[in-house]
Amino acid sequence: MPIQDMKTLVALCQRRGFIFQSADIYGGMKGLYDFGPLGVELKNNIKAAWWRAMVYARDDMEGLDGAIIGHPLMFKYSGHTETFNDPLTECLDCQARMRTDKMADPSVCETCGSKNLLPPRAFNMMFKMQYGPTEGSGSEAYLRPETAQHIFTNFKNVLDTTSRKLPFGIAQMGKAYRNEIIARNFIFRVREFEQMEIEYFVMPGQDEAAHEAWLETRLAWWESIGVSRSRIKIKDVAKGDLAHYSKRTYDLEYAFPHGYDEIEGIANRTDFDLGNHTKHQAELNLTAKVTPNNHSNARLAVQIDEDPEAAAKGINGPKRWVVPFVIEPSAGVERAMLAVLCEAYTEEALEGGDSRTVLKFKPHLAPIKAAVMPLARNKPELVAKAQELKNSLQKLGLGRIMLDTSGNVGKAYRKHDEVGTPLCITVDFDSLTDQQVTVRDRDTMTQIRLPIAELNAYVRGVVEGN
Ligand code: ATP
């Protein structure tokens, strides 16, 4: 049974070094979190799993890592300056600010119950900044509210440098910033977060089928990181609630302790972005300044043969420009992390009335893959052997292996259960003569005696899920 209570999870994340309130020594900043020694591992492992599955395991994807600071024209023509708004109201009695589309009753203040609320107004969520040493107009830029725009503006660069043909996708992971009216539910809604986004380019007309295929692909990925399909609801977003660029969107909503809420949006963005950037770029006559290409070459579009059958026979016929349609699966890293933590959290009753807390992460996501511990910390030969095994395991490149010299094996098991370490390996006095170690499994708590010669292969098998 996944966790039902966010407070318990928040406390565990703080106590064990997963997630800290940012700048907590100065009172903290709402909606900003820092990721501690275990949090950074979990986060990196989730991102690596996404990149492996979405880029390396496929043959139709390229990667990108765009700048975080965005050109004002990029966000003007993407529509964000004008329409990336949430409806904001303010209570005239207690000054609380609220997002009306997320309120159970938009006529009543969530904080004090007053009905004295200002009419909603559009609040733009982008963080505006000054870029360079001169203040004033012409120097403003934005922290990107989504990673997507750099994929669109680099479409031609990627196309030209990789010779891709439709359909193909560009994947990107990275920070995004939104000045959310209310940051709440731990790391669910924050003002700085990371996205894992794909823009998958297809011929117009093939967009709907591609959209359905991506829905299945993404559900399977969530399952692969331990987020059960039975706890995800697919919401076919109502026409009136669609983002300004979307023809149709599926939201994947996970059963968080605070209720079903979005972990990923899979949108059919049509030719909205590529089309707009191409159109405005041409109007402004900017291309000539920024690239040596002429206009038509710099279009964010592909050239296709008017007569594909003739082209297949090697006949060079006329070509035309087509602006591809785009399917965008966009997931949040923090929301993925929160869902993974919720799913992994388990409390188990033990014999003798005791109980334990275990984070049953999939091994490839676990922050620590294995802990190697000497039975006693004051026996140099045991510590040296444990160190040697740790070094050898570390070289496998599976992720973090920890040398745990606390010397209290019972206590160490408890701690490693609580942070989700799949394997604990104990070096005892017999190990020095029989060249075997005790390996304890997190989920079953069974212990086996394993020859040291087989240890690396065994740990690799567990971490890689064999
Ligand atoms: P919401 O309706 O919850 O505000 P959204 O529909 O605006 O989310 P998208 O624009 O579709 O979100 O962004 C894609 C993904 O980025 C979301 O599914 C989510 O995982 C992540 N994301 C968006 N906003 C935030 C945020 N403030 N904090 C953490 N993750 C976020």
Image (tube, rainbow, N blue to C red):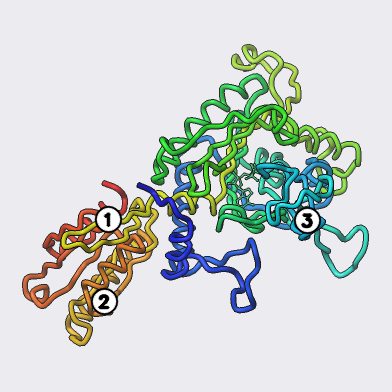
* Alpha-carbon span between mark 1 and mark 2: 32 Å
Secondary structure under tag 1 reads strand
| Left or right position of 427 against 52 | left
Give the residue type that dot 2 points to: Gln
* Alpha-carbon span between mark 3 and mark 1: 48 Å
* Alpha-carbon span between mark 2 and mark 3: 48 Å
Give the residue type that dot 3 points to: Tyr
Task: Report x, y in % for residue 342.
Answer: 43, 51
Residue 77 seen in the figure: yes
What residue is disc 3 on?
A: 142
Mark before the other along the chain sequence, 3 or 1: 3
* Numbered circle sitting on residue 348: 1
Q: Nearer the viewer, residue 103 or 145?
A: 103
User: In the displayed structure, would residue 197 be above or below residue 6?
Assistant: above
Task: Report x, y in % for residue 326.
Answer: 65, 32
| Left or right position of 349 against 26 | left
Q: Nearer the viewer, mark 2 or mark 3?
A: 3
* Numbered circle sitting on residue 387: 2
Quarter of the figure with residue 311: top right
Mark before the other along the chain sequence, 1 or 2: 1
| Left or right position of 381 against 369 | left
Name the residue furthest right: 137
Image point (61%, 28%), residue name: 166
